[in-house]
Structure formats: C-alpha cells, structure tokens
Image (cartoon, grey):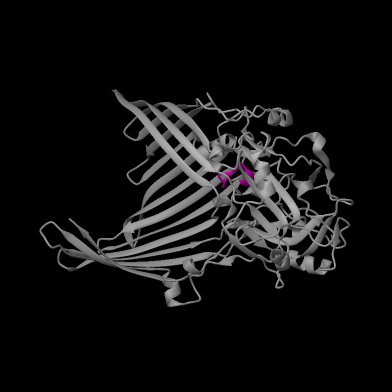
Amino acid sequence: MGDVTIKNLTNGGRIAFGSDEYRHANSLENETLTFKFDGTYLYEDHSIKFGLDYTNIDILNLFVNASKGVMEFDSLANFEAGNVGKYTYQNGIGNDSSIAAADFNRETTALYVHDTWEFSDELTLDFGLRYEVLGSDDKPLYNKNSEARTGYDNTENLEGISILLPRFGFNYTVSDDLTIRGGIGRFSGGSPNVWISNAYSNSGVNLGYYRAEDFTTTPTAGNNVITSIYGPAAEAINNAEADGNVNLTDPNFKLPSDWRYQLAADYNLDIPGIGEDFAVSVEAIYVQKIDQQWWVDASLQESDIAGKTADGGLTLYNDDDRRYDLMLTNSDKDGKSLILSASLAKTFDNGIKFSTSYTNQDITEGHGGTSSTARSNYRYNVGLDRSNPVVGTANYQIEHRFVMTLGYEAEFFDGYATNFDVFFERRSGKPFSYVTNWDDFGDYNDPWSMLSPGFYAGNYLPYIPTAGDSNVIYTDNTSEAEVLARIEEAGLSGYAGGYGPKNESRTPWVNTLDLTIRQEIPGLMEGHKGSVYLTVDNLLNLIDSSQGKVYVNDFGTSRLYKATIDPTTKKYVIDGVKNDSPAFDAPESAWRLKIGVSYKF
C-alpha cells in the first residue's frame, strides 16, 4: 500500500494512511573488518604510544522512498471519485528497488603517535598527532547528464582524502587541593557513511522518477493507485532513461572537523561547620567547527535565478526541467560551541552523599545534518536560501541544565546494604524555529517551483510584516490585524520588516525527579547475593499530577502562517495564521513505577 493523504476535510484537518513513504524500500547491511596495532616505548620521563588503525566496511544500503507511490487527494469527495491531486513514484529501473541499492566499500587508515611526558612531579604534558586517510575501490555510476547540468563528475568517491589531527594537553597539580588541566586539539569523525552512500544509490542512472498532478483513475478492489502502482508511472519507470535525480559528492570536499579548547580546574574545598573535601570542578570548552557539511542543488545556475521576492529577501528560480543534483559539500559558514560547567560533590562518613552541577551551552550551527538522505538534509534545514546557510542556535542545544543527586546508604540488616537515591533535573526547553507554511489556495499555486525547483516541502524562516506592509497581500481568510497579533504572540514583532530568527524559540522547561530504593538480600548459596529494588520515574507527577509535564517539538519547527508568493508581483500572499504549540508528551509526563529483583552469582 502506498502513502495516502486526503486533505481539506470539513473540519480543516486531513487523513493520512498507508505505508510511510520512507519505509517503502529501506534496509542496511554492514560488514566490518578491523585491524589494530598498538605499541608503547618508554624513554626516561616519556611514555610514547604509537600505532595503526585500519577499518574496512562493506556497505549495502537500500533506500528508495516512494517506491510504493505517494499520493494526495484534495478532498474526501475526490478520494471517493479517484481524482488524484498529486502522485509521486520512484523506483529502480525496471521497477526493481534492489537495482538502486548502494553497494560499496570504504576504508579508513589511521596512524598515530602520542607522547605522555612526566615533566615534573606536578606537571604532565601530552602531545599527540593522528593522520587519517580514506579510500574506496568503488565509484558511483557515471551520469553524463548530471555533469552537463552541473559541471561536476558525479563519480567522486573520496579516494585519498586525508586529515591531520594534532593535539596537546596538560595536567598541573598546583597543590594537594588544586589541579588545573586543559588542552587544545583538532578532532574529526562521526560523519555517517550513509551521506556518502547517497551518491551510489542515487546516481540517476539506476533510479527512475515519476510525478503527475490532477488525474482521474477508475479504482477497483484489485486495481487502484493505493494498493497498486499507477499504470503510467510503472510504465515510465520500466522504460526510464538514465536521467534521474542525482546525489553526488563535491570533488573538493573536505572532512568536517573542529578545533577544541578546554580548560578545567578541580579543587578540594573545606566548608566550615559542614564538612571537608568537597569536590569542586569547573570547566570551559570552546569548539570552533570547520568545513561542516552542507548540501546544494548543483544544477541551479545563475541563469536559473528569476529575481527576488518583493522585499528582496528570498531568491526565486525559473527551472522547469524537474531534475536536481544534490551535492554533499562544505559550508562556508561554520558554527561554534561554548560549554561551561560547574559541579560540587561530597560523600559523608554517615552514608549520605550528594552531587550537584550546572551546565550552560551556547552552540550554533549552519546545518545539523540530522537526516540520512541528501534530499531531506537539503530541504528541511531551516534557512532563507538553500544555497546559503543561516548560522543559528543548534537544534539540540540545552541552554541551562541543573542536576542534583542525593543518596543515603545504611545497613539495617548486617552485611546487606540499603540504598535510597534521588535524582533531580531541571533543564531548559529545546530550540525551535517559526517557519512559513507554504501552500496553494484560491487562485494561487504553491511557490515551490519558484523557491526550490523539484521539491514540494521545506523549512523557510518567515517574513515578518510591518503594519501596512507593501510586500504582503492578505486574502479574505485572514486580516493584517490577525497576522500581526499572531506574530506578537510568538514574540517576533521585533523582527518586523525582516525575517524570524533561527531556533530562538524554546519549548517549556522540563523538571524531573526520580527515586530508587534498593535492598540487598541473601543469596541461595555462599558467594551469591541478590537485591530487590523499586524505581519511580517522574516522582513529581506522582506527588502532584500538575507537575512533571513534558512538552516537545519533534521536528524543531512551528508554522507561523499559511502563505504563497504571487508570481506577478513577487509579494507574499498570507491566507491565515497557524499555531503549532509544543505537543504534550504523555508517556514522558506520566509517573512510572518499576519493581524488580536482581541476583548475582
């Protein structure tokens, strides 16, 4: 069954059913071979470690979205009559999804040396150098049409790409109570192989694409577009020429990396009248990101630019070939991270122990790279122009996080410990961005062919109108007053005449209190021991049902208003406001109790 959506219900909602488009053909197999050699050479006050690390991964990645068909019906009546508003289908040539699987090999070879120098009784110095080089014997299938559109050969496989990673650290014991430590280094890694695999599975040679709008079918129980592929679509893919949409890798791609700077201090603190040897730690980490990942449609040229929106903010295109060439490249604007933390901990002789900490994060990025596919990474990153990154607050930044633990251990039964532990956390909400809900309505079409040719969804920061704004047209479904009131409610009035910011809004704060009680019990045989335990997650909600509630924004966006762009005047046409409030997360908001037994022997 395909992915089906019925829009424009009488209550304003929609019905969605069938198999999700991204689950139609989706599987992954990896086979990994690792070889590692490590050595240590001791010379005077130096401990020199060196080695080689080799990893070989055989990857078989099958991902063909919409291989069972994705369709939209503009109303329930159209659904009953078989009138399809939009239909999308893609598959391997010959309607065989396995043909489009990415089957390739990746190698990583790393050489490293690390010197730990005991410079003195108080000071230890660390020097390190790591060299990594990537390789592959496999290349994506060549697509001459893609090279004609973009000027790039799509067979780039990152053979021989390398990076040098120097590092330095120190640990200085100032006194019996104070230690200062820190370091600087360049780090790389963590970029998913699936980003590279997109070029193999979407070469445009092995995958066909079909899209149609506003057609009528005569559905029967055994033959309909919902449970069977639309006939013309299947025929088109069966006879498709090698000229589909393409994913490719920039021949000048550099491995993303970051420079990290860290400084920390550990201090044993005496508090008169309370106790001695409180463990205090403070730490600052600064990260400067370099050559972060970015995706562009390399087929869009200067000649495809048709102008700007009336306010001059958004680039508009005139490109009707329905082809895109999404290239993995590097961003020319990189983010940063500043993470500050402090902690205090103490264990008392009477069995009481506690710790508390605070962490502050200030993290920015141009692209989080949160998807496995080039298509989603390209169209769902929040910004203004998909060719130019907007650096803003990172998707997963937690600006403030307070944590406290309190525990007590005693032996109410000789030889068997009883533990009471409480964990409390208070953290700020996750960032999200207000975006424009681009759509079609009335006599207006949706603006995607102008904003992002070949795509029909994405996240664009909203234009914030002023009163009497000449760049905006309001339809009969809304009014300027209603839109400006919604903007005021969202806290965006200060951006009037420009665009809303990236990830400056937050979901509500989260408070969590958990309790664990554990009692050791005798074992059945000598040397055996068991325990029974009780855990209550979200104890706050058990005490007071109005507490411990969690509200989330799963995709990091909230629609501000529904709009399109007038193709003649290039003005924004606003058709109504939206209010996507953070969703109540019922499972995380409920208290949970668990009773269990563990046994060790």
Relative placement, left or right, of 290 versus 34 is right
Relative placement, left or right, of 533 versus 481 is left
Q: Residue at x 46, y 29 (%)?
A: 107
Q: Is residue 58 in view?
A: yes
Relative placement, left or right, of 518 versus 72 is left
Quadrant where the N terminus lies? bottom right
- Image quadrant where residue 412 sits: bottom left
533 over 188 or under it: above or below: below
Q: Work out whether residue 374 or residue 238 is closer to the camera in this orientation and state it.
A: 238
305 over 56 or under it: above or below: below
Q: Work out whether residue 287 or residue 223 is closer to the camera in this orientation and state it.
A: 223
The residue furthest left is 526
Percent across and percent down for residue 39 are 31, 25
Q: Which residues are magenta?
A: 369-376
Q: Is residue 45 in view?
A: no
Relative placement, left or right, of 372 versus 408 is right
Query: Chief secondary structure of the magenta span?
Result: loop
